[in-house]
């Protein structure tokens, strides 16, 4: 029994209360990873995803995709994978799939879709565009699926390089108000760290928690998200070196538990 307690104490995030800003399977997975490191996850979805306002355009694009009319499909978020799966989209073997990063690639594989390209260094729209353009010097038919608020950087780059690109909105991102209890816990320092996993999450953190204590760790899931957070006016404490959940949790675990937690311990 003493050995078990000792092992628990040795976990890097023992005593930490960490806000997970998204729910669903993704949130459950992050919560499980945090528990494995000794933390107490607080799942408080700050954003959710709503259907596109142009369902007809999405249906048409998915029908063409199933018919093999595209050489490439680009996926820039795990949420887009959820949309594909929800529509039971069929992707023929002749259509190659590019995923923006490891998290998106894992989401594709989890629901049975193949992955042909993941940017080696730059897990961003720019990084994906650069690698795809280098790989395909001749014009190709490409379907880019994106969120309503995403800037069409990938689409513009591919068109500029001479490709035939169809850019279609797959979903909308909407804010979700947190409960009063979560708001109080953030304000009084009972939440030791907040995971910032996208620019949309950063905007909601800034909007919903105007008074975050200095002792609260704000952790961004990679340089791209950190840049978006800065634009939203959110001061980031630490940036994961890779855009993965494991790298994000590892970045948080390098810090010592803030003292403010002791003052508000249950």
Image (spheres, grey):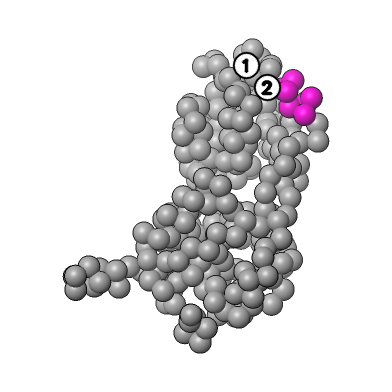
Specify whether residue 59 is painted magenta.
Answer: yes
Percent coordinates x, y for residue 83 in the rendering: 63, 33
Q: Is residue 143 above or below residue 104?
A: above
Considering the numbered disc 2 on the image, is that residue within a helix, a strand or a loop?
helix
Residue 75 visible here? no
Tell me, yes or no, whether the two marked residues, 2 and 1, touch with CB atoms within 8 Å.
yes
Which residue is tagged 1? 66
Percent coordinates x, y for residue 106 in the rendering: 47, 38
In the displayed structure, does residue 238 sit left or right of residue 12?
Answer: right
Considering the numbered disc 1 on the image, is that residue within a helix, a strand or a loop?
helix
Identify the residue at image location x=56%, y=47%: 24
Which image quadrant for residue 205?
A: bottom right
Which one is in front, 101 or 126?
101
Give the distance between the C-alpha atoms of the residues marked 2 and 1, in whole angstroms: 6 Å
Which residue is tagged 2? 62
Which one is in front, 237 or 202?
202
Percent coordinates x, y for residue 224 in the rendering: 61, 54
Tell me where the magenta segment starts and ends, as one range. Answer: 55-62
In the displayed structure, does residue 134 sit left or right of residue 245?
Answer: right
Which image quadrant for residue 10?
A: bottom left
């Amino acid at each position: 029994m003493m050995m078990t307690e000792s092992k628990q104490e040795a976990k890097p995030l023992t005593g930490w209360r960490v806000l997970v800003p998204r729910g669903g399977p993704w949130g459950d997975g992050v919560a499980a990873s945090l528990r494995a490191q000794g933390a107490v996850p607080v799942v408080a979805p700050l954003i959710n995803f709503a259907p596109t306002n142009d369902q007809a355009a999405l249906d048409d694009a998915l029908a063409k995709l199933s018919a093999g009319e595209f050489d490439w499909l680009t996926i820039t978020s795990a949420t887009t994978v959820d949309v594909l799966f929800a529509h039971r989209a069929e992707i023929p073997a002749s259509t190659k799939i590019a995923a923006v990063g490891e998290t998106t690639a894992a989401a594709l594989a989890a629901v049975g879709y193949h992955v042909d390209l993941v940017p080696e260094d730059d897990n961003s729209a720019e990084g994906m565009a650069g690698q795809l353009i280098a790989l395909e010097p001749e014009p190709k038919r490409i379907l880019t699926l994106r969120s309503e608020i995403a800037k069409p950087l990938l689409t513009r780059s591919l068109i500029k390089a001479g490709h035939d690109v169809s850019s279609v909105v797959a979903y909308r991102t909407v804010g979700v108000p947190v409960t009063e209890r979560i708001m109080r816990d953030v304000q009084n320092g009972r939440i030791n760290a907040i995971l910032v996993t996208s620019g949309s999450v950063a905007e909601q953190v800034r909007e919903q928690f105007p008074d975050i204590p200095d002792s609260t760790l704000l952790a961004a899931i990679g340089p791209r998200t950190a840049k978006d957070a800065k634009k939203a006016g959110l001061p980031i404490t630490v940036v994961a070196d890779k855009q993965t959940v494991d790298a994000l949790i590892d970045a948080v675990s390098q810090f010592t538990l803030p003292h403010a937690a002791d003052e508000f311990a249950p």
